[in-house]
Amino acid sequence: MKKNIYELLNDVKVDVAEFEAEKLSDQEVSRIQSQLWKEMNRMKKKEQNYKRSYRMKVAAAACAAVVLAGGVTAFASGMFNDEINSLISIVRGTKTEQEDVQVYEKVGAAMAQAEAEKGKMEQVTAEDQGLKLSVTDLFCDGFTLYYTATLQGDASLVNDADFIAASWEWVKELPVEQQTEDLVLPVKVNGVSTYVDEIFRRSENGDYVMMGKVDLLAMMQSGELDLTGVDTLDVEYQVRRWVGKDTDTMVQKDVGVDEQGDRYVEETYKETMSVDGDWKLAFQVPVDHSKNLESVLDKEENGIVLKKVTKTELGLVVEVEMPDLTQAPYNDPFNDPDIGIVSGDTCLQWLSGYTNLHEDNSSTYTFMVLYDGESDLKLQVTAKNETADLIAEIPFEAPGK
């Protein structure tokens, strides 16, 4: 009997006792605030879009727990750059090791292939207040932009921080009229501001490394960015404050006053350093469309239409048309199903996605999953209810298969 995504998850045994309860760090809180700030403008016109996209991501992330070792193509570590190798070492033994390593290896292989074909990129660097920020490598398939970066400083300055992250608290110190959205969105792509995670993790040699991701798919689907016929991106990247944290020590922080007028505190990681300055980089990114293959499918089941699938160097970009699911026979009051791509008994890892909600309450959902040559692919659409009713399951082949 066929199993849907949530029936597969029911077979997973999880001992929650092994997980430590962790509070959100300052950086994580700032990151969420920045994302919400960006999304609030979009939600004015399409309120349901953010909620649906966020839920899709959460469901797909949960589905990744089903993926077992062996689903990742093995690459020789020597083909990756130093930052990718360091990140793989850092996540070994963590709860998210499997899915993190999958992405690092896939992106690392794409970067190595691009270097072999076009030569190594020239490192871009900005230095201020004793800290040097460098972008060391990058890859863009037209739907996502990944880049590796390092942050280096004297040991007395970084002060043994477990991680260093960009902080946007300085924006709150400005007069209210100067607190603009662009100031908390550190990256601009062809002049359009966007958010990226900026957590630099300490490597064995004492440098701090990260792999950043710019979600071009969401920017294009929202209408903010048009990459039609574009072969090169102009990217600007600017940070004004770095904050280091010790993840082994929790402290209480006075957050402020709540809606009832009561002061409240939260637990957060101990701050080990804070450095203000101006680190600004500008560089061009070649867009590699050469390996992208598109298949127009128009396959329908129970009102769900799998429109097309595009295979890139990194994954599959899937476009799905959905009717108004609040109506019979679906009767979903939230018009908010779960969507994923399954291969046999595993679920492919979600990378990004965006929902366009139409005036008639139908929608177009475009999303990207990591792809490493898996077969027996199916688009699976499942209702969000206790029985996880299967709405549609549409088999397809990846382009070029």
Image (spheres, rainbow, N blue to C red):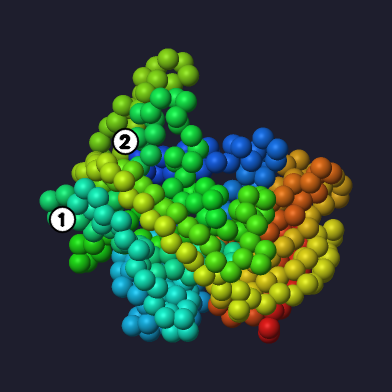
SS at mark 2?
strand
Question: For residue 261, what is the image quadrant?
Answer: top left
Q: Residue at x 67, y 45 (%)?
A: 49
Q: Position of residue 28 (x, y in %)?
A: 40, 44
Q: Which mark is residue 267?
A: 2
The crowding category of the residue bearing disc 1, from other C-alpha atoms within 10 Å (few below 14, some 14 to 19, many at least 20), is few
The crowding category of the residue bearing disc 2, from other C-alpha atoms within 10 Å (few below 14, some 14 to 19, many at least 20), is some
Q: Residue at x 42, y 57 (%)?
A: 282
Task: State the CA–CA distance, disc 1 to disc 2.
Answer: 28 Å
Give amino acid for label 1.
Asp
Q: Is residue 108 above or below residue 247?
A: below
Give amino acid for label 2.
Glu
Label 1 vs label 2, nearer the camera: 1
Which of marks 2 and 1 precedes in the sequence?
1
Q: Which mark is residue 154?
A: 1
Q: Residue at x 44, y 75 (%)?
A: 111
Q: Is residue 275 above or below residue 118?
A: above
Q: Is residue 208 found left or right of 342 in the rendered image?
A: left
